[in-house]
Image (cartoon, coloured by chain):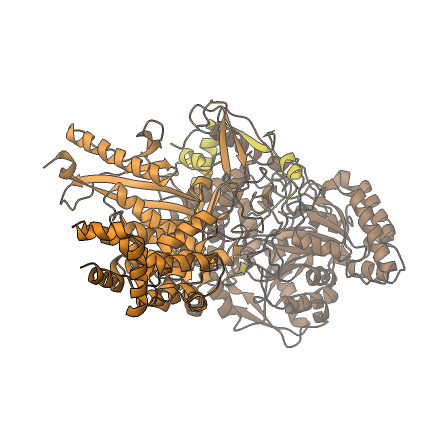
Amino acid sequence: MASEKIDVRYVAKLARIALSEEEAVRFGKQLGDLLEHVNVLSELDTASVPATAQVVESRNVERGDDVTPCLDRETVLAMAPQRQGAFFRVPKIIAES
Amino acid sequence: MNELVTRSAAQIARDVNGKRVSAREITAAVLQRVDETDDRLGCYLSRLNELALDCAQRADRRIAAGETLPLAGVPIAIKDNMCLRGTRTTAGSKILENWIAPYTATAVQLILDAGGIPIGKANLDEFAMGSSCENSALGVTRNPYDLSRVPGGSSGGPAAAVASFQAAIGLGSDTGGSIREPGAFCNVVGFKPTYGRVSRYGLIAFASSLDQIGPLTRTVEDAALAYDVMAGHDPSDSTSINRAVEPAANALREDLKGLRIGVVKEFATAKLGPEIDALYKRAYRELADLGADVVDISLPTADYGLATYYLIAPAECSSNLARFDGVRYGLRVEGDDVGQMYERTRAAGFGPEVKRRILIGTYALSSGYYDAYYVKAQKARTMFAQDFRRAFEHCDLIAAPAASSPAFEFNAKSDPYSMYMMDYYTIPMSLAGLPALSVPCGYAGTPQLPMGLQLAAPLFEEAKLLGAAHAYERATEYASKAALAV
Amino acid sequence: MTVKTKYEAVIGIECHVELKTRSKMFCGCANEFGGEPNTKVCPVCLALPGALPVANKEAIEHMIRAGLAFGATIPAFSKFDRKNYFYPDMPKDYQISQYDMPLTLGGSVGYWLEDGTLKECRLTRIHLEEDTGKSMHAGGGDGRIAGSAYSLIDFNRAGVPLMECVSEPDLTSAQEAVGYLEALKRTFVQLGVSDVKMEEGSLRCDANVSIRPAGSMKLGTKAEIKNMNSFRSVLRAIESEITRQIDVLESGGRVVQETRGWDEAQGVTHSMRSKEEAHDYRYFPDPDLVPMEIDPALVERLKATIPALPHDRFVRYHREYGLDPKQATQLVDNLPLAEYFDACVSASGNAQLSTNFVLGDLSRLANETGTPVYASPVTSASLAELIGLVEAKAITSKTAKELLERMWAGEGSPKAIVEKEGLAQTSDAGEIERFVAEVLAANEKAAADYKAGKTNILGFLIGQVMKASRGKANPALAEELLRKKLE
């Protein structure tokens, strides 16, 4: 298992959470500590063990292609932090870097 | 205290269906009880007085029209991570502080259709992440047995509400122990059904592959009653189990004859100190006294539960909580561009524990670490399921502690990992998706505070589990020996 | 060797196609283009707290059919994964997609160029995912994202089922890229899995373009071209990008790996920020959905529903029937007409005459009347009957044209009309001689001219005999008898 120090700024950027200096230091340490704890998993020999995504196995859960009622538009837009007419409005989008 | 509020859910339903008392009278009494006690306890984030009285009136009308309702007039505390149309649904978070749900969770709808009366939306650790309710951003909930202590978490609000007679049934959700641990701390029954037994549709997700709704009640009979109403297939939840549900109310028993109950070697309680060790040894003896064959079993992976859980649950939560972005609903903190708006909104909207879990989960899924952390944990999870399958070859049920201590004081667990340790005994069952519950099993510490015995069954064996818990409860009556502070 | 032939292009296409279903991929909201903004949304596609997805069975079956049409492998096991990244028109801030176990793997797309050359492009995979909402960029003047002050979002499209088709880099020119896309389009339309309306954005594509010295096996550095909104812009954008890359190399430069946007107005691609670091999408299996196990019986059942494919039709029409590529394409692109044509060919056994009638007189009549050929009273069986009469020389081609008009007008089967009106071609020499005598008597001047050496007047006289016989006279016999009389 990886043992290098967690790059908390990079992770916070991926998670879109602004961190203060103090938080970056505190979370960095706490996440590092937690990783120490979870590293005990490396003791488990999982070479021949399949991964489990869902513990109660099930397959092919599908719905028929039927149309059902939508939400009322005013209900939808009433939730919007900012709306303009019938649209949700957001600040300018800067292309991903 | 009005005697009406102390009645069990089963008793209320019997009385209301029998027209000996009206749903309206019960509701009025419970609302008054909430008025009298909740300022001190802080169980509810939102009270639903008007809706409660409407529902009571409707229940009375339906009964007058000749219907029989399984939960007629039964007051319900709904953990505030479940949607109820037209009500504020916050998940205990600033990011949803003022969000009004436009739809109702399947489990909640089933409860309401059965005649249940929604008293209020109950407090929880933010997004159900925590074991003390201290992570709620919107309020403090106190333990009814000692107001200086936590009610447990994350379903602390519903647990405390049921314990303090502010509801007969609490709807909780359990991801790693979030029903069972507060159940133990508040001296009530906390029951997590098999993963997928109760629909998650409308339950605000924490960790999708682990989250499960279940009841907190003052009696096992009430837990069975609530379970029978909520369990069953829901086409709106792809992970909902599509198989028949054996009604649990018919399976309640008075003894444990013919049952083998396994005690997990790796869960030795000596490390919890002599008092608690003695308490659990007594509990296992009580099981034997009821006719159970108590046997030793082994869960070799037991010690890896926390590590496994604290990779899987945060990984899923990091993705589940991405939608709280300030675009469509909830809190927004403006920024110069969308990226800045996201970062500020989420920085202001999430509390420290939620941020920690999002960060650790993001890390565990990120490029270069996915196999080492996430996939490794998914494989460890398979080993838990295998261990339990092997263990259940030697026993019908498993007995274990529900928590390693009684309720602790506020701010007692400053280090995140010591808080995570609270779920040590409950997480393995969660990882394997098993039905499990905690039932009151005595008192420990100074002052003497409630403790819970955890019982777990193989997948889908809820009826057997509740049946056995009922026998234990009837024989021991620890809950009714309670000395409530409020 | 010219600069152009010194290099060859290597092109791969990733294209997103919206599936034609009644409801969205994971919820019951209507899958329809347009409509009032934010009216086709529900807790699921708006990603409200607590909402959960349930997969649309029809969309999964569309995917399998699309894969089968291209000879792809349908794996026995498939699953949905979450692709995590933030974007305001993507409600969950992750997209439900397929990472390592897509519904279809491999296969290849046969296509053709304008001159009829047949080509093939291998598919890497086709996977199923969900579409995003639509952002409109405002406050900047021209609707572009760059320079806009804010964006407005409509989530009606969010959650529409989308298939992503990823090709191998088998294409070597802009023409091939367009040929490939056209083949995808016609196949999806004819399978009924998508309407493929580029103007509505139901097909969107990106092209990975690189160049290398002709004959080299080593791949050059690729640029990803975006914002191509029509097949014409695909053609122009790729051509322009190839030229740009050649210019870069010829001037001693180096092509950098980047995303470039196509500027339709200026006819050039421009850099959209280079991809220094790859996105970290943190794919993992979606725990809200369960895996798919594809039953071989289902695959067999779906296989049986796949119609004759456009590419096979083209090959048959062009190579076997000898239609020119344009005619063949015209037929292939009109499925009901192609089916009509096929029925006629199989009933008459005569592809040449079927082509002449279907693409000639019948198409003209269709244009004039506004009734499609296949919906007209001229059934493929009656057309085959007419072709049979022509082949047996029972009627002249002139009569055939006339009959066709009358059949179109609903007068019944050609044989019935012929019998009723005695229109059958006659080779009775005695009968034709009478018409010849009649015509020569009425056209003395023409007969004299012929005898004086103006032999080309014979055609006029034959025409007169045909007219007198109301088209029934066997034209060859009429000519022979005329000559005999005049010489």
- Image height of C467 relative to A84, above or below: below
Residue at the far left: name it. Answer: C1
Q: Colour of chain A?
A: yellow
Residue at the far bottom: name it. Answer: B258
Task: Depth check: give the residue in front, B384 or B209.
Answer: B209
- Give how far across and how far down residue B374 sits, in percent: 42, 51
- Give how far across and how far down residue C460 sits, in percent: 27, 52
Q: Quadrant of residue A66?
A: bottom right
Residue depicted at 28% across the width and 51% down the height: C325
Residue depicted at 27% across the width and 43% down the height: C175
Give the side of residue B484 with respect to residue B287, left or right: right
Q: Is residue C106 visible to the viewer in this orientation of the structure?
A: no
Q: Which chain is brown?
A: B
Task: Depth check: give the residue in front, B253 or A83.
Answer: A83
Task: Depth check: give the residue in front, B43 or C354.
Answer: C354
- Give how far across and how far down residue B253 sits, in percent: 71, 71
Q: Quadrant of residue B453?
A: bottom right
- Give how far across and how far down residue B309 sits, in percent: 49, 52
